Image (spheres, rainbow, N blue to C red):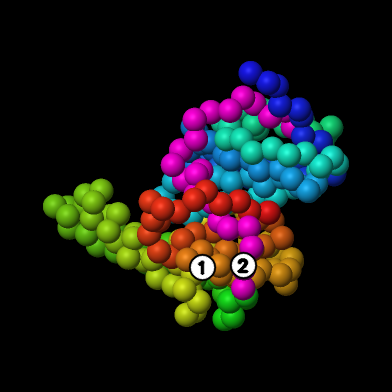
Amino acid sequence: MTAIAPLHFDDAREAAGLAAFLRRLLHYDRAAAVRLQAGGGAVAVFGRPPSFEVLAIRTARLVDAVDLDVTVSAGELLEGIEESAGKAVVPGAVTGPPWAGVLPPRGGWQPVAGLPPVAAMRSAVTAAVAEFRTRDEALPEERRTRAERDRVAREIWSRTLAGTGLPLRAVHAAQSLGFLPPLPDEELPVLLFASGPWLRLRTPYGSIALRTAPISLSVSPGTTR
């Protein structure tokens, strides 16, 4: 097997940011895999945290123009990151999960209007979490099953945000993975884009992408920046 050359980041903070993303991803799935795509002096790392039903994307600038497309263990990639040196040793490839074969498109993204401020998005997530807890606690013992709790959660998190078509679960994922700008940086740009059946919530710290229509068997694997 041909060894993969280490990735050298443009700034040590890029390595730290990627490591933080991987730690959060592994919090939700200790066996998580990620797909790496590098080209044009940057690398994009795709992951899919369970239950959110979205793709999380973290990008980082590289010193060299590396061409790479590989699916690896998120845990092994994290172990290979040297934050102080600003580099990462890429582990050997693994068999990718189904989601890794269908990524958001590279182009065709158009802005979607109506996205509320970050503070309002955080409030919407907080309210949804509180509603789930209240409704969960109100369930009679005979109905407190995994299926019923999943039904309630699906109903709440499938609601769209401010008429944008973006499900609340996407905002919840962005907050949980550290993508929403923290105080006092809440004025940093957070934008919503659409391309075909895909929506993408883009922030300075990463992106959340999801399809608004079922995946067709005829869809070919896509790429993203």
Quadrant in which residue 133 is drawn: bottom left
Which numbered disc flags the more N-terminal residue, 2 or 1? 2
Q: In this view of the protein, can residue 67 be seen by the observer?
A: yes
Question: Label 2: few (<14), some or many (≥20) within 10 Å?
Answer: few
Q: Position of residue 199 (x, y in %)?
A: 53, 66
Q: Which mark is residue 108?
A: 2
| Magenta region includes residue 100 | yes
- Labelled pair 2, 1 in contact (Cβ < 8 Å): yes
Residue at position x 51%, y 43% from top?
100
Is 197 on the left-hand or right-hand side of 118?
left
Which residue occupies 68% across, 29% down?
Answer: 90
Q: Residue furthest top?
A: 1
Q: Secondary structure at mark 2?
A: loop
Which span of residues is magenta-colored?
88-110
Q: Quick check: is 101 in the magenta stretch?
A: yes
The residue lying toward the viewer, choosing from 213 and 55, is 213
The amino acid marked with disc number 1 is: Gly
Please identify the quadrant where the C terminus is shown: bottom right
Amino acid tagged 2 = Gly
Query: For residue 35, which numbered disc appears in the image?
Result: none
Indicate the position of residue 114 as horizontal and vertical percent values.
57, 81
Q: Which residue is mark 1?
A: 196
Compared with 51, 193 (above or below) is below
Number of marks in the image?
A: 2
**Which one is nearer the viewer's eye here, 122 or 114?**
114
Q: As drawn, is 180 to the left or to the right of 204?
A: left
Does residue 125 appear anywhere in the picture?
no
Distance between mark 2 and mark 1 Cα atoms? 8 Å
